[in-house]
Image (cartoon, rainbow, N blue to C red):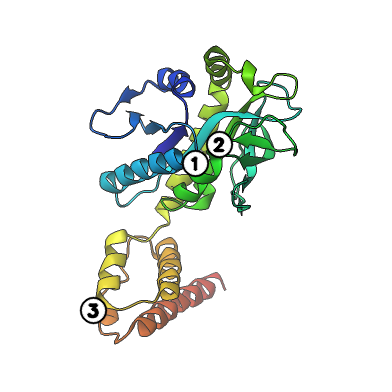
Amino acid sequence: MINIVVALATESRPLIDHFGLTQDPGVAGFRVFRGDGIRLVVTGLGRVPCAAGVATLGALDARASRAGMSAWLNVGIAGHASHEVGEGVHAVRILEAATGRSWYPPRIVDLPGRGETVCTVDAPETMYAEPYVYDMEASAFYATAVRYSTAETVQVYKIVSDNRGDGVETVSKHRVREAVMEHLAAVEQAAAALSTLADEISATQPRLEEIERMLQRWHFSVSQQHQLRALLRKWRVLRGGVPVLDAELNRCPSARSVLAEIEDRLGEVYRGAKAGES
């Protein structure tokens, strides 16, 4: 599943038509559209509505499937001092003007457009004081979406709609719709790459049911939970569908001993693999 988040209805219409999406009548609060492997939400302008819209899709993900992982893509218009209107960019840094916080989306798939700093502001930018791409949602989108997926599968793609020569007052619904239509191929490319990446990462994730049983059986601190997930990820890569939670592991008296036991088992696998190579 790829979750596409847009702020404006005019941004959404070309995407809805291109991907053949239909509105989901069962979702309250936001207009949500779905199709084959794609879900789209129209959040409205600003950080707070965007965060709420992302959370709505995150809740739908949780109800739909507890085993897989979805990718996330924020698509929308933005301003820049000198970039040409109609140019597409992806975020390599996201800056939140109100708080000074920054995020750096890790990129391990090819995304269309040049990489830029996207600065999220709370009102349309008219001065373009810094060489940033200015928008009103990216920071809230990213900070919220990474709660539901890995950072690599959460990305931002913006289309320049205004600059010093063509200010925000020149941006019309027609221009927004045309800009998105011209970038449908780029959005589809990004969505496909992120969806594939999410599938690949999901294939290496430990089974959620097994993790939950272990968390109920033993008390793991937050840092121990991170250790556990990392070890189970390695276990799944090396042992495939072989369950790690068995009678022997159940005899461990504490979370610490569980982690040590899994590490020992992984060590045996590594040693066995090396012996087979020699």
Q: Position of residue 139 (x, y in %)?
A: 55, 45
Residue 232 percent location from the top left of the image: 40, 67
Q: Which residue is mark 1?
A: 47
Residue 221, quarter of picture:
bottom left
- Residue type, numbered disc 1: Arg
**Rendered image: mark on residue 136:** 2
Q: Quadrant of the N terminus?
A: top left
Residue 35 seen anywhere in this rendered image of the structure:
no
Crowding near the residue tagged with mark 3, few <14, some 14–19, many ≥20 C-alpha atoms within 10 Å: few
- What amino acid is found at the position of numbered circle 2 in the picture? Met
Q: Is residue 235 visible?
A: yes
Helix, strand or loop under label 1: helix
Q: CA distance from mark 2 to mark 1?
A: 6 Å
For the residues bearing labels 2 and 1, Cβ distance under 8 angstroms: yes
Residue 10: x and y in percent read 47, 20
Q: Which comes sooner in the sequence, label 2 or label 1?
A: 1
Q: Callout 1: 10 Å neighbours few (<14), some, many (20+)?
A: many
> Label 3, on which residue?
247
Q: Quadrant of residue 207?
A: bottom left
Q: Secondary structure at mark 2?
A: loop
Label 1 and label 3: CA atoms lie apart by 49 Å
Mark 3 or mark 2, which has the lower sequence index? 2
Q: Are marks 1 and 3 in contact (CB under 8 Å)?
A: no
Give neighbour class at mark 2: few <14, some 14-19, many 20+ (Cα, 10 Å): many
